[in-house]
Image: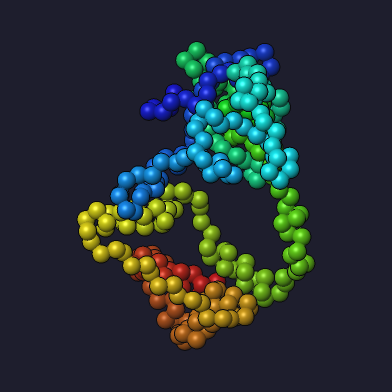
Amino acid sequence: MVSGQRAQWKGFIKFGEVSFGVALYTAASTSDRITFNTINKATGNRVNRVFIDSETEERVEKEAQTKGFEIENGQYIIIDPEEVSAAIPDSNKTLEIEAFIPCSDVDDVYFDKPYYLTPDKMGGDAFAALRDGMKESEVAAIARTVLFRRMRTVLIRPHGKGLIATTLNYDYEVRSSAKAFEEMPKLKIEGEMLDLAKHIISTKKGEFDPATFDDRYEAALADLVKAKIEGKALPKPKKVEVSKPNDLLAALRESAGMLKAAADKPKRTAANANTGTGRERAVRGAGKSPASKAASQRKAS
């Protein structure tokens, strides 16, 4: 059980002849984002949403509303909510694993929404057997079940001490990449331009750490709200510095630090360059700023 959260779905996992109880918990949520209400400027009161008939412009109460499918412009087939409910697939509350596949087989463009998958109190051993077996075999599981009134395909993978279940988009929901890229010219980058691009990439290598990424829009909204509450001057937006136009090769050279390094590089004798032991040079380098370290790395490169 995930502390402080309510399970979004409870059911069973079945693989082979083994089945055990599990629960799904939302792994990602936008509930902590700052939200605004629509307000009447004249009164300061919150505005309520109402539905208006597109032709008569009269208000339509909730009990008078139904569903409809547009077959032509302005013509609809009426579908009652009971008919919609009857069309929902029956749920047996079972995530039945259909196949185990290599984790890399699923293009992440098909990923929809992640959920933490945890065992119930009686299914711990079977849950751990599935989790550890998948880890050792380096596979993920494909399963299907009815989730939230729809038949869904789910990708299940080991995740820490538990499992993570990601609902997958259907093929018809994913737009073709061929269409997205069909107007791109066929270009092949070679020589110095490719070498410079690879050099810049090598100097910027790092590790993925989501804690280092800040939501600047959310932070700006928080500052705005705080300033309004305290009656202070509103924060001024930072001026955008527009880059000077350069051709691609010059921009790559500048990014790689080659132009500045060539202009500023001091001439040193071999004796001066090697002054001090490696440990002493490391101690001196530890006090440098990140920018100085980056410059040193570029010169070394």
Q: Is residue 75 left or right of residue 28?
A: right
Tell me which residue sits at (47%, 49%) in the image: 209
Quarter of the figure with residue 288: bottom left
Q: In the picture, which quadrant includes the N terminus?
A: top left
Q: Is residue 10 left or right of residue 141?
A: left
Q: Is residue 102 above or below residue 35?
A: above
Q: Is residue 45 above or below residue 253?
A: above
Q: Is residue 140 left or right of residue 240?
A: right
> Residue 301: x, y in percent?
55, 71
> Residue 62: x, y in percent?
50, 31
Between 296 and 134, the one nearer to me in the picture: 134
> Residue 31: x, y in percent?
42, 40
How many numbered markers are drawn?
0
**Image color mode:** rainbow
Tell me which residue sits at (47%, 15%) in the image: 121
Between 160 and 37, the one nearer to me in the picture: 37
User: Looking at the image, can residue 165 be seen?
Assistant: no
